[in-house]
Amino acid sequence: MTAAFRPFSPRLQLAALLLCSAGPLGAQTEDRGVLLIRQHGREVGQETFTWHWGPPGTPDSVSTAARYPRLRPAVELRATLRRSGPREATFQLERQEAGRAVFYYAVLNRNRVTVRRIERGGERAAEYPAHGTVVLLADSLLAPYAQLASPALQEERDLQAVFPATGERVTVSIECIRTGESGAAGGRICRLNGGLAGEIETGSDGRLLRVSLLIKGLEGLRMPD
């Protein structure tokens, strides 16, 4: 029987409060939307997200959920990310596949990433070194990649992407150009190079329009509001 797709357990929510002590978010810009996801040109799912971009010196956060009903087996994911600085973030991920639910809770604290993995029958922890500015990502969730298009990261020369669910760590470089495509004059396209290859497109208002991950053949296009 397939497990119900539900919000994070109270135990994990309590852990988030204990492990992430931060002040109020303050004035923010909100970006709420839906990405239509294609893989190698074939529609495979959708992702619904809400980004909250804080003013300088305050946290940014995203809540997102993706469903891939056309994959076999079907996959459902839900995540929350709160980024408080170049070396401080929390990331909570739930993955459901073939009736099995796995939870990941990651904390970035200065020069290390600590990950707890929880599923029925057991719990385990792992720790990974981190250097420079670090972003936390998941393979099949596209909205969190928008943090790589943040102006605050454009000047970074030592940027590392960490995937808590797999332990993968890659070095990334970013190059952004102005564009008038997608009807968004003054928007930007940010190209990812190094361990990640792809593009992130944002509009003139900063809204996320497109995420393309070349290695996986995944592309998420924003659906009309």
Image (tube, rainbow, N blue to C red):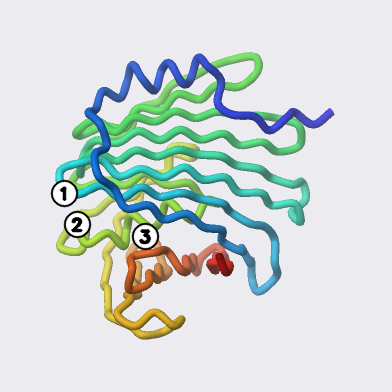
Closer to us: 216 or 142: 142
What residue did someone put label 2 on?
Answer: 152
The amino acid on which the numbered mark 2 sits, given as a three-letter code, is: Ala
Q: Residues within 10 Å of mark 1 (few under 14, many from 20)?
A: few
Residue located beneath label 3 in the image: 195
**Left or right for 137, reference 46:** left
Measure the alpha-carbon separation of dots 1 and 2: 9 Å
Taking 101 as reference, is 197 above or below it?
below
Question: Mark 3 or mark 1, which is nearer the start of the sequence?
Answer: 1
Name the kind of residue labelled 3 in the image: Gly
* Rendered residue at 33%/54% (across/down): 147
Q: Return the residue nearer the eye: 63 or 162.
A: 63
Q: Secondary structure at mark 1?
A: loop
Residue at horizontal 64 percent and vertical 66 percent from the top: 39
Residue 12 point in image, percent of width and height: 48, 20
**Disc number placed over residue 56 in the picture, else none:** 1
Which mark is on residue 121? none
Q: Check if mark 1's residue and mark 2's residue have beta carbons within 8 Å.
A: yes
